[in-house]
Image: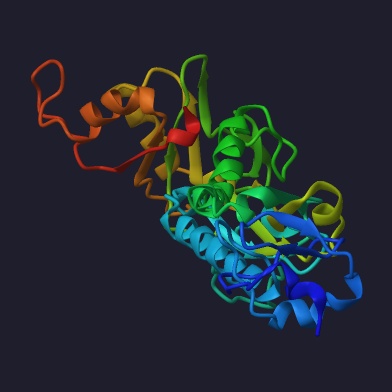
Amino acid sequence: MKSLFATGLAVAFGAAALFGVPQVLDVTGALAASAEPAYLDAAFMDTAPWIALGGLVVNSANLSTLYLGFKTSFQRGLGQAPSQYGRVATTVTSGAREEKYGWLGKLPNIREWIGDRVVHSMMAHDYAIKNKPFELTIAVDRDDIDDDQYGVYAPLFEEMGMSVGAHPDQLVWPLLAAGFSTACYDGQYFFDTDHPVLDANGEPRSVANTDGGAGAAWYLIDDRRALKPIIYQNRKSFEFVAKDRPGDDNVFEKKEFRYGVDGRNNVGFGFWQFAWGSRQTLDKANYAGAREALMGMKGDYGHPLGIMPRLLVVRPSLEGEALEILNAERDAAGATNVYRGTAELLVVPWLA
């Protein structure tokens, strides 16, 4: 019989720790190099009745169980991740390295059919969003598995899931905040005072969706439209993967099990007409001016867009001012607050 068992009876708990050089556990739980590696092929080690006194033994069956446990923690965190980006961003599924949005230059309206149809060109602008790769990887020390310390990693994998769940927010909100200095499809900054629009006579004129300022930014948005102010473009959803085979280089060279996620996506601007960005003081007068400007917004040839701003987005530091405008029964002068309930307040920690 195989001299492997000369050290004593091995009792099964978990799976055998085999990484590169075949190893056995003696009855004290200490690892010893086998003098007879020919007996320790992978098929034998995965079926042998091992017991590890004082530690988890590692083979493909238990590695699979460990992977499922870590993935469960990841999924739990993914489901718990608070998300707000969907209030201002439309998710678009991508099928290529980049997607072109030249049609963003058009907001067509129904017209009376007199004579031939008027065909609206959808390629007025050269605006594209190129997908970017993202990843997050966690290394688990093999010694922690051997010593039954793998449970301490569960919160870490749960945090990994929450990080993936929050990833769209970490892209969308910084882009919205950068709208005062980042160009959109028409070549102007997303929040600007001179967006080119054709008037009723077909003559170009400048339209604003900001009143400037130098203070903390706040945003008034019509969030009920099919295409919101921000586009979240998803090419490949995040997938939980592992490199935990005994023959993997990271295991053999660094005695590390590696677990990670990766995906491809990016963000860009949608229609600027549906959002107002301001750095002026958030008070009743400036809020009223933003509402009036958005509701009076017109597309090409003077067609009203029917915008009804109903979402006020602020950073945490402006929550008090926003609540005073939207919730207080009376203003600071004691007069009736006519703007009470005119919008929903969304406080976004990602804008802090």
Based on the displayed image, in which of its 4 quarters is residue 7 positioned?
bottom right
Q: Position of residue 230 (x, y in %)?
A: 58, 48
Please name the residue shown 89% across and 65% down the image: 35
164 w.r.t. 207: above or below: below
Please name the residue shown 61% across and 66% down the image: 67
219 w.r.t. 32: above or below: above
Q: Position of residue 267 (x, y in %)?
A: 66, 49
How is the rendered protein coloured? Answer: rainbow
Q: Is residue 167 left or right of residue 76?
A: right
The number of discs equals 0
Q: Position of residue 317 (x, y in %)?
A: 37, 22
Residue 161 in view (yes/no): no
Q: Tell which of 301 and 282 is nearer to you.
A: 282
Based on the displayed image, in which of its 4 quarters is residue 26 positioned?
bottom right
Q: Is residue 144 left or right of residue 209?
A: right
Please name the residue shown 66% across and 77% down the image: 115
Q: Tell which of 223 and 337 is nearer to you.
A: 223
Which image quarter holds the N terminus?
Answer: bottom right
Residue 222 in view (yes/no): yes
Q: Position of residue 327 (x, y in %)?
A: 18, 35
Q: Tell which of 248 and 239 is nearer to you.
A: 248
Q: Is residue 264 left or right of residue 313?
A: right
